Amino acid sequence: MTTISHTKQNSISVNTLKQKIDNEQDLVIFDVRSKKSFEKSHIPNAVYAVCDANSQQNIMPKLPKNLEYVLVGDGKSGDKNDTYVSHMSRMMKEMGFKISFLENGMENWSGNTVSGISQDIDSQNLKKMIDGNEKFVLVDVREPQEYEEWNIDNSINIPLSQISEKISEISENKKIITVCTSGNRSTIAKYILSSHGLESSTLTGGMDSWSTSFEKGEINVETKDGHINITQVRRIGKGCMSYIVSSENESIVIDPVYPIEEYIKIAQDKNTLIVAVYDTHQHADHISAAKKLADTVNATLHLSGYESYDIQSSKVFHEDSQKFGTTSLNVIHTPGHTLGSLSFLVAGKFLFSGDTIFVDSVGRPDLRDNGKEYAEILYHTIHKKIMTLNDDVMILPTHFEKPSPSGSMITVSVSKAKKIIDILKKSNDEFVETIGNISIPTPPNYQKIIEYNKTSMDKPQEELMALEYGPNRCAVTM
């Protein structure tokens, strides 16, 4: 008898729910039926909700308690889903939520219904929307400090706690996408928006996913050595770039990042064998996947002989070379960003410059202390070793600041770099002084990342990638 009475206390009739909807109360309707059932028919402005362990642990406790919630199940007699809805409503009520469940569920609903489902969006599709100049508003619901640290271009920041009071700042005429760190807060924001009659989607996995998702650019070139294919692999949100360079049926990989499966898949799709893996230098802003990839595909690992590593590898030095396919890679020692930085010239035409020089700036020389000394070294490296290359040599760096459409290449010729990178026009003294006066935050966890990249300690991939969270900060920005 107690259970029946308690159950009825938590239920809401169809007529009462209709009245609440008509009165435009701050109401969130959670439809916890199967996705297929929801897609076929549901109450207008209801949101499809998955009541799994993650939602109970990470989402439910953060739901605002100033809103009213209604759970909707199937309502069929003896249905396990309906029993579960009753249980969830009691549990949430005990947590202090104003909550009820629809008596007899959708089986008993006699009001209007709609079909379809608002699909959440993954990082690749969000990037396609950005590239296609689609109209949408990206609402970042993290706290202002988190947002200022790192965000997606053209997003707006409305902290989760302020969503309801700032609803007027969100356009009703554009697709709404919510984003947070991992997807929990943005999912709650989606629920709150639904209570105001606004349909939205969430960026799946949030900024974590944005940081680790890939896109590619590709070029095929006939050189003096024969045909070469270069695939530029870009981490969309992190600003990291790496490369697979293929000649005939052999490939080399330069500056790989996690997850390594992307490189293995590209090589398989191109029916080419990865024979060597190179790092241009000891990275400070992201975890190198060079050793892991080399071990996995049984390729030779090549690391700078001028850097301190506790990793078994083939050490490479200035003017070393390696043949692959019908072409070759030639090593150039390009210190400045680090004392051991290398650049790789392939087929005399393509310079893989690491963090020494980018398409619109230069690498910062201050991450290992002695910033002034390193800046002078960087100046001489760029002017004596890179700007003296043929004007048509294409520079392919390891980082980018400005996004580019998927499929395109981020690159610049030596001749164009001389014209557009303003700091290259300065004298040695001006160059050093300019860099010394620029205050740039260091990459998050950079000392831990350097230590890992020295030793390649065996740790779970998730733990390693968590160290990288945040923006790329290896360029001198002016």
Image (spheres, rainbow, N blue to C red):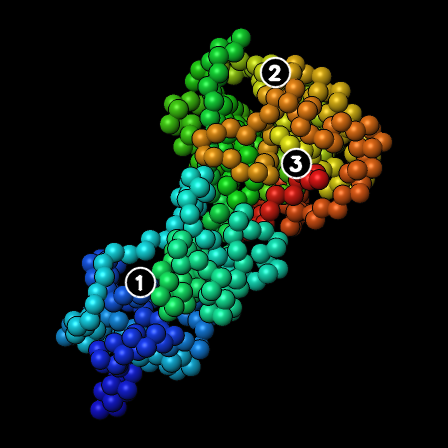
**Res 194 quadrant in image:** bottom left
Which residue shows up at 52% across the image and 52% down it? 155
Which residue shows up at 37% across the image and 27% down it? 269
Q: Nearer the viewer, mark 3 or mark 2?
A: 2
Which residue is labeled 3 in the image? Answer: 282
Find residue 97 and report its horizontal and vertical position in percent: 40, 79
Which residue is labeled 2 in the image? Answer: 392
Q: Quadrant of the N terminus?
A: bottom left
Find residue 214 and report its horizontal and vertical position in percent: 46, 39
| Camera sees residue 344 | no
| Position of residue 411 in the picture relative to residue 209 (left or right) | right
Q: Are marks 3 and 2 in contact (CB under 8 Å)?
A: no
Which residue shows up at 48% across the image and 12% down it? 222
**Res 58 quadrant in image:** bottom left
| Position of residue 378 in the picture relative to residue 215 (left or right) | right
Amino acid at dot 1:
Tyr
Q: Secondary structure at mark 1?
A: strand
Q: CA distance from mark 1 to mark 3?
A: 46 Å
At label 2, counting other C-alpha atoms closer than 10 Å, the crowd grade (few under 14, some 14-19, many 20 or more) is some
Query: Foreground residue, 48 or 446?
Result: 48
At label 3, counting other C-alpha atoms closer than 10 Å, the crowd grade (few under 14, some 14-19, many 20 or more) is many
Which residue is labeled 1 in the image? Answer: 48
